[in-house]
Amino acid sequence: MWILVFFDLPTETKKDRKNYAIFRKHMLADGFQMFQFSMYIRHCSSRENMEVHLQRIKKILPPKGHIGIMTVTDKQFGQMEVYYGRDPVNTPSTIQQLELF
């Protein structure tokens, strides 16, 4: 499973910029990586793990701004086409889960 977080946050005042920085810092600390400037992604190994990270994001939502959260399966994420200009780019690979016996 993948979590995609899209956001448009105000940066007009010093307080707005601080809220933006705190939100971004917490997402990075929780294992999200920047896909685009206002889009961060994170792979989760299970639906239960995904729910934990969704709750963490919801707890740190800033007071202002527009935030969208979407979850997709590995298969759906793998069907995404990414381009840099007209050149195709590989999508981020799924993290392999370590199995212990």
Image (tube, helix red, strand yellow):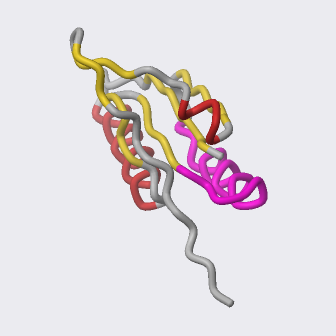
Q: Is residue 99 above or below residue 68?
A: below
Magenta segment boundaries in residue numbering: 43-62
Q: Nearer the viewer, residue 59 or 33?
A: 33
Check the picture and name the quadrant holding the C terminus.
bottom right
Q: Is residue 52 left or right of residue 85?
A: right
Q: Which residue is situated farthest in the bottom direction here?
A: 101
Residue under the image location 32 percent in, 25 percent down: 11
Q: Where, by quadrant of the figure, is residue 86 drawn?
A: top left
Q: Is residue 11 left or right of residue 47?
A: left
Q: Is residue 45 left or right of residue 34?
A: right
Q: Main structural element of the magenta stretch: helix, strand or loop?
A: helix
Q: Is residue 74 above or below residue 27?
A: above
Residue under the image location 39 percent in, 45 percent down: 24
Reply yes or no: does residue 58 show up in magenta. Answer: yes
Q: Which residue is situated farthest in the front direction here?
A: 101
Q: Nearer the viewer, residue 82 or 49?
A: 82
